Image (cartoon, rainbow, N blue to C red):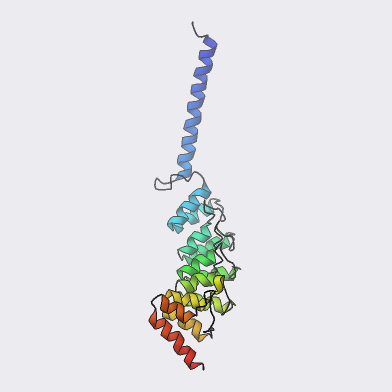
Amino acid sequence: MAIPISIVRRFVNFLLLFGISAMSCLGAHAQNMGDADFDASAYNLNAQLLAVSKKGDAERASALLSRGAAPNARNRNGETPLMLFARKGNGPMVRTLLEKGGDVNLPALDKTTPLMAAAYGGYVEVMTLLLDAGADPQAQDQLRKSAMIYAAGAGRAAAVALLLDRGVELNRRYEHDLTALMWAAGSGDEKTVRVLLDRGAELDSRDDRGMTAAQIARKLGHEKIAALIEGKAVEGR
């Protein structure tokens, strides 16, 4: 049975229309993607900004912000460009994002903040920028870890000192009754332990297992740290 000519014409018109639409979409995607080495999933400015921020490409990130990309765009983990550049310790880019309206306390899905990311890396310049912009040093992630815990646990002496200078309580008890000194003792970093000891950290506090900072250090094989803490205890008697 012959197909009516009207149906054939409609089908041809559909193919022509589809072809034009597809080519337009491809052209738009190509224009929006920019250079060939952009993340293949970045079909819009915000996605491109997140892609280049993850790579630490400050030049392209700045260009995308100038083109209208949102400074508080978030990836699938809830991370913002501010978080990604804070994690890399890029002070100039952190400053730019803050000036563009980046939310200094906007957390990722796991509730980590840009300040926590910078504290873990020991990036004091970035931490200072964030704190000056209103970052909350007391905020906790979903594991109830704060910037102080990230800094002390990673053995970042200068970051710990900065947080203390900004009002974080020296002997605050965190999850499992751990103190900053206990976290530092566990890290095995002598400089960080000395910062806390020089500020007057409590030496006989115990966690919920009944262990002191010196005992934690010894259990983890940090004999020098344990001896340092115990020697400080003897001095104070």
Which picture quadrant has residue 55?
Answer: bottom left
Q: Nearer the viewer, residue 52 or 160?
A: 160
Which picture quadrant has residue 163?
Answer: bottom right
Judge whether 91 appears above or below 8 on screen. Answer: below
Please report the residue visible at 46 percent of the width from the left and 52 percent of the height from the top. 51
- Furthest-front residue in view? 209
Left or right: 222, with 12 as reference point: left
Please report the residue visible at 57 percent of the width from the left and 55 percent of the height from the top. 72
Image x and y of residue 5, in percent: 52, 9
Image x and y of residue 31, in percent: 47, 41
Left or right: 84, with 172 as reference point: left
Q: Nearer the viewer, residue 50 or 29?
A: 50
Q: Is residue 188 visible?
A: no
Judge whether 64 appears above or below 97 on screen. Answer: above
Q: Nearer the viewer, residue 26 or 220?
A: 220
Image x and y of residue 138, in percent: 59, 70
